[in-house]
Structure formats: C-alpha cells, structure tokens
Image (cartoon, grey):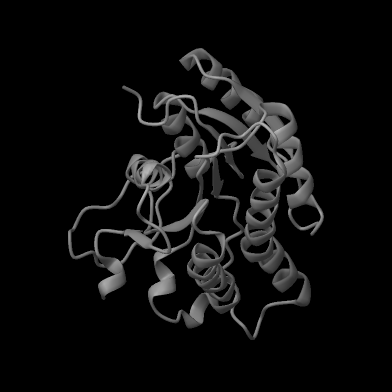
C-alpha cells in the first residue's frame, strides 16, 4: 500500500533540486502534487508530466514569495485546483553566504520574505482554508513540513542573515504546532549538505557517520512526517550527525 495514497500536497519551490526529488518521492507513494515554482516554468512543467506518468495528478501554480501577498494566493489557488490540500511542504528557499556586515537591505528583505514569512503565511492560509472548507471530513488532519537547515543547531556567523531566517522558521514550527493542534501537525526537516543533481559539491565538513546524505534521504524524512499522526513540533535532522559537532 502506498504511504500517502490519495493525499494532496502543495510542495513549494519544487521545480528543481531537492524540492523536485521530494515531490517525486511523494507522488510515488500515491500523493497528488501541486507544483509551486517561481521562475523555472519549463522545469515545473516537466516535473508535472513526470508526476502524471507515475499515475498521480499534478497542478502548476506560480508565485513569487518576495511578494507578501503571494503565499495566500498560492494556497487559495491550490485548494481551487485540487479541491483541498492535506500536506504543505515549505521547501522554497533562498540561500546566501553573505555576512551581516556585507548584507544589503534588499538581500535581507528577500531572505526574510522567502525563507520565513512565506512559510508562515502559507501555514496560516492552510489552516484558514481547512476551517472554511465544506467538503473536508471531520477527521481531516493536515500536515505541515518545513525545510530548515542543519545550521539552525548553532549560530553561524558566516551566513548570519540566512541563519536568522531559518532559525525563525524553526521557532515558528514549534509555536505553530501548539496553535494549530489538534487538526494540523507542524514539523520540520533540517538537512545537511546534499550533493546537487548536477554533480556540484560543496565543502561539507566533518560528519560523525561519514556518509553524505542524498536527496532521497530528505524525501523519506518528509514522507515520514507527512504520515505521522502523533508527532508535532519536532525538528528531524538528516545530516549524518553534523548538528552534534
């Protein structure tokens, strides 16, 4: 039996890289996918076709999360297209190695809106849509899975503006888990360095398990949290133990 049979998931920023792998893994487990993208139209369309080839439904929704009104529009559109949304995966993210000293106001603004504010507003919109829906069963239980970064385990002076946004999303994960219970669970996955599909590598640093995680490891963690009925407010590190160092 597929683990996510007939569920509907909105996966943000999933046209390429990690988000794409997460969306495909969820589709293989029986989930229909609302594919959100910002600029990667061709890649998003290709992903939707691949999901349909698996035998699941796929819809496309475009949204620029630097616009604070976009998250609400994206969520409403997802509900209109799919009928409802069971699972929200907040994957869309902007990474920056800029330091506090060098960061511009514009860079701070983009990081905050995409990495922190958008996931918060999407969660708010999901809760509202669920409350207002007239077709959801009484036992509906939504799932929110936020994608963090293993860097949230300790301060990172080299990427402080980026770190602040992910740390904010970590705090929201735990706070929202309380406020949105019992109808919606809220958890997060904190990945370590993942080898990009293009084969590009980054300085990963030491790992206690000496094994670098791959996209499918992250995807399986998301699927677990999307299924779990008694887990909420948790941060699941998938980083071969790097957060312990």
Q: Say whether residue 229 is left or right of residue 209.
A: right
Horizontal and vertical percent for residue 44? 64, 30
Which residue is situated farthest in the left direction here? Answer: 209
The number of discs equals: 0
The residue depicted at 70 percent of the width and 35 percent of the height is 134
> Which residue is more in the foreground, 58 or 150?
58
The residue depicted at 31 percent of the width and 59 percent of the height is 239
Horizontal and vertical percent for residue 229? 37, 47
Q: Quadrant of the C terminus?
A: bottom left
Q: Say whether residue 235 is left or right of residue 182.
A: left
Q: Is residue 100 above or below residue 138?
A: below
Which quadrant would residue 67 be assigned to in this image?
Answer: bottom right
> Which residue is more in the foreground, 160 or 35?
35
The residue depicted at 42 percent of the width and 70 percent of the height is 151
Q: Say whether residue 83 is left or right of residue 147.
A: right
Q: Quadrant of the N terminus?
A: top left
Horizontal and vertical percent for residue 13? 61, 44
Which residue is situated farthest in the bottom direction here? Answer: 101
> Which residue is more in the foreground, 160 or 85?
85
Q: Is residue 199 above or below residue 98?
A: above
> Which residue is more in the foreground, 139 or 237?
139
Q: Is residue 167 above or below residue 69?
A: below
Q: Is residue 29 above or below residue 197?
A: above
Horizontal and vertical percent for residue 93? 59, 56
Q: Say whether residue 11 is left or right of residue 117.
A: left
The residue depicted at 71 percent of the width and 64 percent of the height is 113
């Amino acid at each position: 039996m597929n683990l996510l049979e007939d569920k509907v998931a909105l996966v943000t920023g999933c046209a390429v890289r990690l988000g794409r792998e997460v969306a495909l893994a969820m589709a293989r487990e029986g989930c229909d996918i609302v594919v959100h993208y910002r600029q990667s139209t061709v890649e998003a369309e290709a992903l939707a076709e691949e999901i349909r080839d698996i035998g699941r439904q796929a819809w496309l929704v475009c949204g620029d999360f630097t616009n604070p009104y976009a998250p609400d529009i994206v969520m409403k559109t997802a509900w209109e297209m799919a009928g409802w949304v069971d699972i929200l995966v907040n994957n869309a993210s902007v990474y920056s190695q800029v330091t506090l000293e060098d960061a511009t106001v514009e860079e701070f603004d983009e990081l905050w809106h995409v990495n922190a504010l958008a996931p918060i507003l999407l969660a708010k919109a999901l809760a509202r849509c669920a409350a207002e829906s007239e077709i959801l069963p009484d036992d509906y239980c939504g799932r929110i899975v936020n994608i963090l970064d293993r860097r949230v385990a300790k301060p990172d002076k080299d990427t402080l503006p980026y770190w602040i946004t992910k740390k904010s999303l970590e705090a929201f994960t735990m706070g929202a888990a309380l406020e949105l219970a019992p109808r919606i669970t809220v958890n997060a996955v904190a990945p370590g360095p993942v080898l990009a599909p293009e084969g590009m590598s980054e300085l990963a640093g030491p790992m206690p398990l000496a094994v670098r995680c791959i996209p499918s490891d992250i995807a399986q963690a998301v699927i677990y949290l999307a299924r779990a009925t008694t887990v909420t407010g948790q941060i699941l590190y998938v980083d071969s133990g790097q957060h312990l160092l």
